[in-house]
Amino acid sequence: MSQSISVVVPVRNEHDNIGPCLSRLDAALRSHAHEIVVVYDRDDDTTLAAIERLSPKPARLRLVHNTLGPSPSFAIRAGIAAAQGDVVAVTMADLSDPPEAILEMAKKIRDGADVVSGSRYMRGGSQTGGPPLKTILSRGAGLSLAWVAGVGTHDATTSFRAFSRRFVDAVPLESRIGFTFGIEATVKAHSKGFVVGEVPSSWTDRTAGQSNFRVAKWLGAYLRWYSAAMGVPLAVWAAWLAEVSRVLAHPHATLLERASLLASFLSILAARRLRGRMALVDVAFPVCFVAPLVDARMATPYGWDGVLAISAALLVIARLARKRR
């Protein structure tokens, strides 16, 4: 397949924004092979009439009718299915995300990444405007998934992202409501061993038209993928913290015990980095490094049997979380 960037733009009555959006996309991508795929749900969408009035129209513009269902995720999935490039990017028609960042995202894809976020929350990224609750939830989810689960991006919920052709062909998306395709793609890529990356991006709230984002209505769908990603990491870190509490709570904890906490912590991080993600087997690091030392000193009924019982319970919880994906 020849190198080409497909940009998917889902629309719903974006008549005020579509002209400036297509103009900036065309200018940003003019020197590179590309196509712009505008996806609409209904024939009476006011965006279509606005595109018809454009003169001149972008030469590499395609219109795709979404027949999967009336939702942003369905429109995006329809656009991705119709895209022909080796890199498939998704952006919104309201220009909240900078089209100029698409080339940097495409470069990262071609350098080996599979899912790349235009990240508001990494160094160099920013966000201006937007509902406070949406910002808090999005930032909290993104940073916790990065720090706790190590998913490879600080902005797992953004809709501004790019995909490699190998990911698009291998991993079907199933999101049906809202913009949950973004976190779904991040979680699936991370769990299946694809490379997740990010580039800094500046998000600015729309200045024209009406947002279709519905926090309360879509929260459950976001939580489904968030919990799927966090189940195993939380089990591992909870097992480590259980040993931390046992060591630090005792006034006579030895230097070796404290060193074993650090060793198990670094081992978890090293295993995550080498593997690309955390696994249930990582619970063995605190159990094997720390627990025997504490048990030898404490000689209490809790000891080794208690650690194994807690670890087993955490593993069961993590296993159930993984089955929900």
Image (cartoon, rainbow, N blue to C red):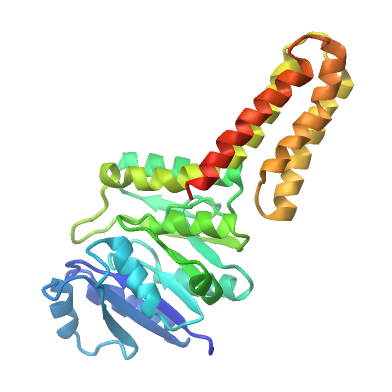
* Residue shown at 72% from the left, 42% from the top: 281
* Foreground pick, 247 / 103: 247
Using residue 117 as the reference point, say whether residue 220 is left or right of it: left
Q: Where is residue 196 in the image (x, y as percent from the top left)?
A: 58, 60
* Residue shown at 47% from the left, 46% from the top: 324
Count of numbered circles on the image = 0
Q: Position of residue 121 (x, y in %)?
A: 49, 50
Q: Can residue 142 be seen in this view?
A: no
Query: Above or below — where is 212 with respect to 230?
Result: below
Query: Above or below — where is 2 with respect to 98?
Result: below
Q: Position of residue 3 (x, y in %)?
A: 53, 86
Q: Position of residue 122 (x, y in %)?
A: 54, 52
Using residue 133 as the reference point, say whether residue 113 is left or right of it: right
Q: Quadrant of the N terminus?
A: bottom right
Query: Above or below — where is 35 with respect to 21?
Result: below
Using residue 16 as the reference point, say whether residue 241 is left or right of it: right
Return the residue found at the far left.
44
* Foreground pick, 103 / 298: 298
Please identify the quarter of the rendering in which residue 236 is found: top right
Q: Is residue 137 visible?
A: yes
